[in-house]
Amino acid sequence: MQSNTIQADTILAETMQGDTLQGNAQLAATVDDGEGVAEARIGGGKAPSPITAVTARSITIFLLAGPVVAVAVSVPLLWGRAVNLTDLVLGVVLYAVTGHGLTVGFHRLFTHRSFQANRGLKIGLAVAGSMGIEGSVVSWVANHRRHHAHSDKVGDPHSPHILDETAVGQLRGFIHAHVGWLLAPDTTSVERYAPDILRDPDLVAVGRMFPLLAVVSLAIPFGIGWAVSGTLVGAISAFVWAGLVRMALLHHVTWGVNSICHMVGRRPFATTDESRNVAALAVLSMGESFHNLHHAYPTSARHGVLRGQLDSSARIIWLMEKFGWATKVRWPAAAKVSALAVPAPATSIAA
């Protein structure tokens, strides 16, 4: 087992250093823990105990249904009182902070090593991403790397293309990629897919604090709502709109990248999967919906590389680089982007 862990570390290091999916493909094809490549394709981890599985599923169902139930229950209490400016501003700020914690921190820094961060920035991004309530930094990184290693193939934890391509199959695939995969037992091996994260004591500590940070993420709007309004109604209103609804919107945008961005949209760059660009989600996803470029060039710090593509995550990385907090940023090379572009179809000229 130790030799296989070392092998996985070596291949993973090559994946993080490379500019294409070659390292990920090698990881998917090579890592073997003694039970064959088939085991690697289903995550390489052990199935959780029944108690753990039930607990995880219960928490997931709460996160899925909680915001809807909370809004329904709050309607009588908040009847005649529209959402106020404090709730909206607080919701937008927390969405931006936690969302960029996920896109800049969990995704582009910790998963793909698109840049290097000083210790303060690293911990700050890990905390902000954890407050997005999408899981600990360790499990998030492991699952996303597994997704890249097997994108839209057997072993991808959330591909919409796991069934037949009939209308019913596509609908079931969409549901699986969007939320269904969250209800399945997590068999992704963090030792295999995130050994570098496990070696970082700061990230391990933040990962262990995930439950507390999730509570803090929802307690902040409640506390600010109480402080601003001085009433329980104001606190509950802020908790619902800037807490639960904000969290749910961020979740569905993230899951939309998993589902929508692998089913519809443009494919200007060559990849071996079905990743696509969906410009309509660019602002809410903070640039993550330019998913086709990301799968073609995963270490690129900017996903929206074409003219007019909005990528606030890349802009934040640019600012952090200017302040000296981020270094060795892997900005997309023009020659590389051009090489990855799908050639325009030839057009015939009428005689």
Image: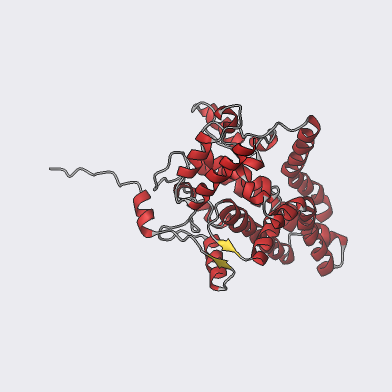
Quarter of the N terminus within the rendering: top right
- Vertical comparison of 78 with 163: above or below: below
77 vs 86: above or below: above
Name the spot of residue 139 as percent of width and height, x first.
67, 45
Rendering quarter of residue 61:
top right
Residue at (65%, 47%) from the top-left corner? 140
Percent position (x, y) of residue 92? Answer: 66, 62
Give the position of the C terminus as an image quadrant: top left
Between 303 and 251, which is closer to the camera in this rendering? 303
Q: Residue furthest left?
A: 351
View extreme (bottom): residue? 323
Q: Taking 241 as reference, is 140 left or right?
A: left
Residue at the image position 51 percent from the left and 60 percent from the top: 311
Which image quarter: residue 85?
A: bottom right
Is residue 180 rendered to the left or right of residue 275? right
Residue 252 seen in the current view: no
In the rendered image, which quarter is residue 215 located in?
bottom right
* Place of residue 304 in the rendered image (x, y in percent of width and height, measured from the top left): 47, 57
Q: How many marks?
A: 0
- Of residue 349 and residue 326, the one placed in the foreground of this image is 326
Q: Which residue occupies 53% across, 42% down?
A: 148
Looking at the picture, how far across and down is residue 301, in whole percent? 50, 58
Q: Is residue 182 left or right of residue 287?
A: right
